[in-house]
Amino acid sequence: MRGVNYATATATVAMWFAGRGQAARFPRQHRWARRVAAVVFFIGLLSGGADFLGRLFGEDPHARMRCLSNLRQIAQGVQIYANDHRGQFPPTVEALLVEGDLTSDVFVCYATNDTRADGPTTRAIADQFAMPGHMSYVYTGRGLDVRSPPTAVLAYEPPANHQTGGGVMFSDGHAEWLEATRLTRLIDELNAGHNPPRPGRVR
């Protein structure tokens, strides 16, 4: 998107200056074209500028929705795994990838510097998750199953991913965005051994 915005602006600038040379010969014919070019230029400039400022202050306009989509796809993979394992959720992310019919893209947060794990086979890709930089979420589904409370957490984003909050995936399959303070409290509950988090502790 950024490339499209800046490319549009650059092309429009070129049209503007090209039109200036012809304007003296055909002032009326080119006046409207220059005005259209100016409007397109400023739209592209504002769009690109908004995107730049958003990234500068850690608020990518697309990253939040993409992460929630990733977490929902991971939830679907968990259900696929559970259907083949008597209702048990995957013990590890590697098992989820191998048997959950997922690609490595869904484990990467767009707001981080993480990259998708790659390899000639699904098993080779799964082995890469042991190395840093390919898994942007924390999986907490080990020991849970389809009978777990709907508020049990299957995965969450570390606060560092977005700074302002992060996505959380629950055992009933839905993903929710929590602001930074609530996300930190939820993680504290999980680290203390409370999954699902205790009622009233994540508000």
Image (cartoon, rainbow, N blue to C red):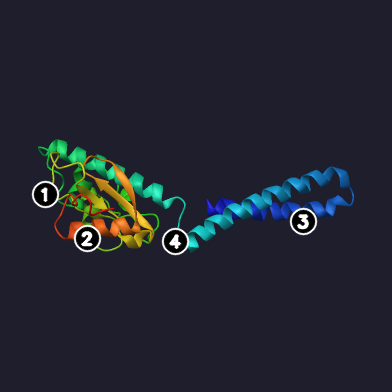
Residue to which mark 4 is pinned: 58
Q: Amino acid at mark 2?
A: Asp
Q: Amino acid at mark 1?
A: Gly
Task: State how far apart marks 2 and 1 are (Cα).
Answer: 19 Å
Q: In screen coordinates, is 160 left or right of 40?
A: left
Residue to which mark 2 is pinned: 188
Q: Amino acid at mark 3?
A: Phe
Picture coordinates of residue 158, whole percent (x, y) = 30, 59
Task: Say what secondary structure mark 3 lies in.
Answer: helix
Task: Say what secondary structure mark 1 lies in.
Answer: loop
Q: Residue at x 29, y 50 (%)?
A: 168
* Mark 3 or mark 1, earlier in chain: 3
Q: In screen coordinates, is 130 left or right of 109?
A: left
Residue to which mark 3 is pinned: 17
Mark drawn on residue 143: 1
* Mark 3 or mark 2, earlier in chain: 3
Task: State how far apart marks 3 and 2 are (Cα).
Answer: 59 Å
Q: Residue at x 24, y 41 (%)?
A: 77
Q: Residues within 10 Å of mark 3 (few under 14, many from 20)?
A: few
Location of residue 14 (image quadrant): bottom right
Question: Vertical placement of 61 versus 113: above or below?
Answer: above
Task: State how far apart marks 4 and 3 are (Cα).
Answer: 36 Å
Q: Amino acid at mark 4?
A: Gly
Q: Residue at x 14, y 57 (%)?
A: 193
Residue 115 seen: no
Q: Residues within 10 Å of mark 2 (few under 14, many from 20)?
A: some
Picture coordinates of residue 96, whole percent (x, y) = 20, 47
Of residues 28 and 149, the one nearer the viewer is 149
Picture coordinates of residue 1, whole percent (x, y) = 52, 50
| Farthest-out residue, right | 25
Residue depth check, mark 3 versus mark 2: number of the one nearer the observer? 2
